[in-house]
Image (tube, rainbow, N blue to C red):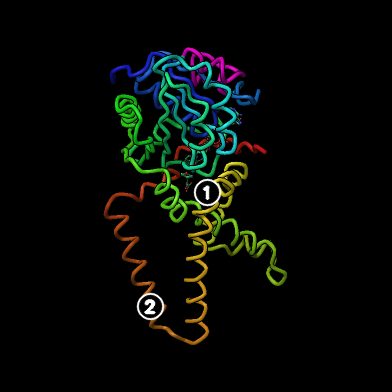
Amino acid sequence: MAKVLFKRLAIIGVGLIGSSIARAVRKAGLAETILLADPDSRVRERAAALSLGDEVFADSGEAAANADIVIVCAPVGVCGAIAAEVGPGLKPGAILSDVGSVKGAIIRAMAPHVPAHAHFVPAHPIAGTEDSGPDAGFAELFEGRWTILAPSPDADPAAVAKLRALWEGIGAKVDVMTPEHHDLVFAIVSHVPHLIAYNIVGTAADLEDVTQSEVIKYSASGFRDFTRIAASDPTMWRDIFLNNRDAVLQMLGRFVEDLTALQRAIRWGEGDKLFELFTRTRAIRRDIIEQGQDTAAPDFGRRSAAPAADHQ
Ligand SMILES: NC(=O)C1=CN([C@@H]2O[C@H](COP(=O)(O)OP(=O)(O)OC[C@H]3O[C@@H](n4cnc5c(N)ncnc54)[C@H](O)[C@@H]3O)[C@@H](O)[C@H]2O)C=CC1
Ligand SMILES: O=C(O)C(=O)Cc1ccc(O)cc1
């Protein structure tokens, strides 16, 4: 069993990511005590029934008050309010972190509430599924996947090293980025792809000349992949787009430009242009597979059969 890194670890928001961290930390023996907090009583009941931690709180401040590390695992839009609740009560030397898919806006919202005696180290695990809630989590979610840390340049190196050790202890590979670069990278590799999926599934659902049952009956694997992504949590993704607005709009601008060029190539029968792009993109897919990055979490084949929670 690995060495205990933290005496008391608190997780605020016990959904897919929070419950997966709790399971993984317990499995690896990285914390003596795991404290959980969630405002949703159904989530607290499930967290207790699944024995995800040692204590379950309704009040985030109470869970965080005696913790050595507090990880906020709630939708991006409420992270600032949670920091305001937990910040004043943080112990001297405590680490405050998060798992939000956006970094710049979360840091602007959370940092003002972190007292000088605590350390703020923002993070983002690049691992997840389209499911939500405590039943959807699993201990292996982060194995072999990246976690990005986005500490400020004057962050305490020991606190950053401790958070890195936690993520590595549950199987993740760790990279460090500035929040600005993080938000640009994930706008193109995660946020815009989700928007495209939401859009194409919405378009197919709204067509007049193709029925809903035809869309379902004849959906080939390409469309099915989009429907998986488009089944992702509405609250989480609304918050991501509202909070990474500039980077998403920048990448969407490029995307629309390139899509228009493809539209034109089809209209004018420019097969060589289509062929050249499709050849380049095929090579990217092969690179991803060669580098062992095609370990999509859903293929762990161990997701809960429980329906995804529907948070508003
Ligand atoms: N789902 C995914 O694939 C990934 C999600 N993330 C990030 O992780 C965070 C959590 O996402 P999930 O675990 O998927 O969501 P989830 O919906 O499964 O869980 C979120 C939990 O936060 C709780 N919550 C809501 N408001 C709260 C508040 N004010 N105080 C405390 N708890 C509150 C909810 O009751 C819920 O139990 C988000 O910021 C998301 O961007 C990061 C990587 C992957
Ligand atoms: O389910 C998928 O395909 C994902 O892309 C999961 C995911 C969602 C959001 C993140 O910030 C990181 C990973």
Q: Which residues are magenta?
A: 47-66
Q: Is residue 285 left or right of residue 100?
A: left
Q: Earlier in the sequence, mark 2 or mark 1?
A: 1
Place residue 233 in its image quadrant. top right
Amino acid type at circle 2 is Phe
Amino acid type at circle 1 is Asn
Vertical placement of 212 versus 165: above or below? below
Task: Determine the secondary structure under disc 2.
Answer: helix
Q: What residue sits 49% from the left and 31% below the top? A: 111
Name the spot of residue 115 as percent of width and height, x first: 47, 21
Name the spot of residue 264 as percent of width and height, x first: 51, 81
Label for residue 275?
2
**Does residue 273 show up magenta in the picture?**
no
Q: What residue sits 43% from the left and 41% below the top? A: 127
Q: Locate the C terminus and report the quarter of the image it occupies.
A: top right
Mark 1 residue crowding within 10 angstroms, few (<14) / some (14–19) / many (20+): many
Vertical placement of 281 versus 94: above or below? below
Name the spot of residue 13 as percent of width and height, x first: 55, 28
